[in-house]
Amino acid sequence: MSKQFTWTIRVYYEDTDAGGIVFYANYLKFFERARTEWLRAAGIHQHSMKEQQQAMFVVKATEVEYHAPAKLDDELKLTLVVEKLGRASVQFLQQAWCGERLLCSGRIKVGCVGSVSLRPEAIPAEVLAKIS
């Protein structure tokens, strides 16, 4: 699944600020949802991963750049590409688009941790096979 994954979301009133545009931090929420849907499309459910394999993904680092605003009722196309897949981490390039206009781009690095210890662990082999 290293090719581009695309997921669509609508901007709701709760996503906007007093100026009527998407509040900047909400792009991180949108990116999180896209990663969750990417995992789901690969057959990985995060709750099951936590319960059955005692492992979960946590965000380690973000680098976000804002290019243009989105507004109420806009339909956003969220894309992600795996840039780097390590033994215990995944780095994504994620973008939010409205039509042909790039709104936001970010590099998000997630790490795999044990669900009990919360310490770094290798990505479970079954999960790694599905996302490779």
Image (tube, grey):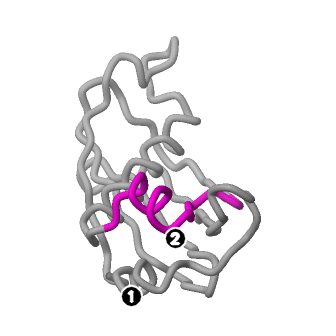
How far across and how far down the image is residue 100, in percent? 27, 57
Q: Quadrant of residue 42?
A: bottom left
Farthest residue, direction top: 18
**41 or 45, which is in the foreground?**
45
| 117 lies above or below 98 | below
Q: Residue at x 57, y 61 (%)?
A: 57
Residue 28 vertical placement versus 19 (above, below)? below
Which amino acid is tagged 2?
Phe
The residue that mark 1 highlights is 129
Residue 4 relative to residue 128: left or right: left
Highlighted magenta segment, given as a residue range: 44-61
Name the element at disc 1: helix
Comparing 62 with 111, the one in front is 111
Assess whether residue 29 is covered by the magenta stretch.
no
**Of labels 1 and 2, the one closer to you:** 1
Q: Which residue is mark 2?
A: 92
First in sequence: mark 1 vs mark 2: 2
